Amino acid sequence: MNRRRFLTMAAALSAATAARAAGARAGQAAPDPAPLALPAAWELSPPLIAPSERPEDPYVLVKDPTVVFHEGRWHVFMTIRPKGKTPTEYASFDTWEHANASPRHLLAVRDKYFCAPQVFFFRPHKKWYLLYQVGEPGRRLQHQPAYSTTETIADPASWTPTRLFFPKEDPPSRVEAGLDYWIICDDTKAYLFYTTLNGKMWRMWTPLKDFPDGFDHCELALQADIFEASHTYRLKGLDKYLTVVEAGQSGRRYYKAYLADRLDGRWTPLADTEDRPFAGAANVRPGRGATLWTDNISHGELIRDGSDETLTVDPANLRFVFQGVLQKDKPSQYGLIPWRIGILTPATPE
């Protein structure tokens, strides 16, 4: 997005805010906010992270990337699938050109199943948090949100052992087990979002001072043709929130986008069909040096403008790290899909 387009968008949002305030003072219905101008098309990088060579414990995929830039390096956590396990792996590198050659480190926070990570720095505690999902077979809801912490993100051995957000039992209002847990905070609360495979995105919250404890209420935040990997961000300079969420469960994966004024507010669709997606086969083309190595845009995360708990992104500089594969290369067994990680950047007009 160029500067002129961004300034036009910001001015429209400011005008809409002023109009809503004036209408409220006059006792009139407030007009709807101006929509966020999203990239109309994306350019695709080559695959940037593939499975590392591990003959003694081979695996065929890397997926579910979460990424921050800190102290001059990229830090990426991702799910892998060696035989009999679904753990989280870590890599760090100075530039994306060096990503695939960077050393890989399997985290030792838990045995076998801890995946779909999210990483952020929680300023009130001066600690990094790594959020992920685990399996608890004896629980009413077997998929559980869990976390580890560290003061040193660059040391993969420093993460604490797994801790559950709900160590004994789930709140009664949490009626469905979900996937792909996600934390984002505003000035007063921490919110926990997650999705279920029946088209629902759920929302829980706790006072910021109580985090990571106190998530005792669960409510439906969004219901649509969605199924997993909902990621929510604060939009820098716009006082808005953006959720991107994966769809296309029965075929090619693509991403939708929704906008809200508040984290506890109503989500309005911005790009929510396969032919006009946030990111999908319909609006992704190979960039310089790339071929069309994927027509699935799956489990992606926007690169943030910072690394803290507000999950802020710059709408003038959107970049999307994701997992991809060609639909024709998908085997019937989910755990053998050869996902690779790449980046989408807004396409320049042709």
Image: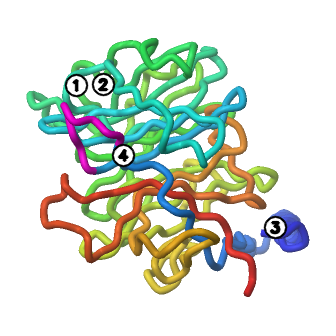
Residue type, numbered disc 2 = Phe
Q: Image height check: is 48 above or below 79? A: below
Residue 13 image label: 3
Tell which tag, 1 or 4, sits nearer the viewer. Answer: 4
Q: Is residue 53 magenta?
A: yes
Circle 1 SS class: loop
**Toward the viewer: 213 or 156?**
156
Instruction: Decide: few, some or many residues near mark 4? Use Cα within 10 Å; few <14, some 14-19, many ≥20.
Output: many
Mark 4 vs 2, N-terminal side:
2
Pointer 1: what residue?
Answer: 169
SS majority, magenta: loop
Instruction: Decide: few, some or many residues near mark 2? Use Cα within 10 Å; few <14, some 14-19, many ≥20.
Output: some
Query: Would you identify the image quadrant in which residue 217 lies?
Result: top left
Q: Quadrant of the N terminus?
A: bottom right
Query: Would you identify the image quadrant in which residue 190 lies?
Result: top right
Q: Image height check: is 210 above or below 136? A: above
Mark 1 vs 4, N-terminal side:
1
Pointer 2: what residue?
Answer: 166
Pointer 4: what residue?
Answer: 180
